Amino acid sequence: MPANKEILEIYEYALDKYGEFAKALEKTDAILKKCTVEEIPAPRLTGEKLREALIFAGKLFEEDTRANVYIALVDLGRNQVLTVCKLNKGKLLIASYAREGLIKQHLAEKAIKAIKDRVVV
């Protein structure tokens, strides 16, 4: 299964479980199409370090240490972004989505950057 498809399936699960507000505004399919996905080389990153980074960045909702999947809400001041991370074979996959208004704030990208800044050395 391609990495992007896998992370988007996990994001869909996270939306079903934690994204009531987002789903009230847009359909899940539309959200998944607009989701920002980034793959980052992270050969020395461990699940523990990723967990600490997500807790520092906001609130960790769920973690599966066997599958190395983490679901978190990244705090960006007055905005919060639902974000999913998967650590896989020296790579970190991150999926994030934020509904933007008239003034684009690039919140999904900022959430990914907040995580990258804490885990990539």
Image (cartoon, helix red, strand yellow):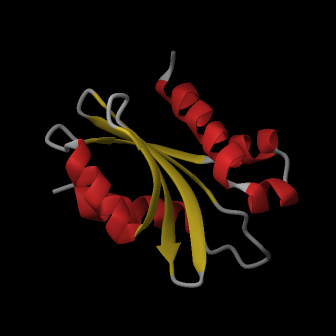
What residue appears at the point 19 percent right and 44 percent down from the top-left corner? Answer: 45
Residue 106 visible from this viewpoint: no
What residue appears at the point 53 percent right and 27 percent down from the top-left corner? Answer: 6
Please say if 87 is above or below 2. Answer: below
Using the rendered view, name the quadrant where residue 8 is placed: top right
What residue appears at the point 66 percent right and 38 percent down from the top-left corner? Answer: 12
Where is residue 57 drawn, in percent x and y? 38, 69
Please say if 92 is above or below 107. Answer: above
Q: Is residue 80 left or right of residue 31?
A: left
Task: State the quadrant of the C terminus.
Answer: bottom left
Q: Is residue 98 left or right of residue 46?
A: right
Using the rendered view, name the quadrant where residue 90 is placed: top left
Where is residue 85 drawn, in percent x and y? 43, 45
Foreground residue among 81 and 117: 81
Foreground residue among 18 and 88: 18
Residue 85 visible from this viewpoint: yes
Where is residue 120 drawn, in percent x and y? 22, 55
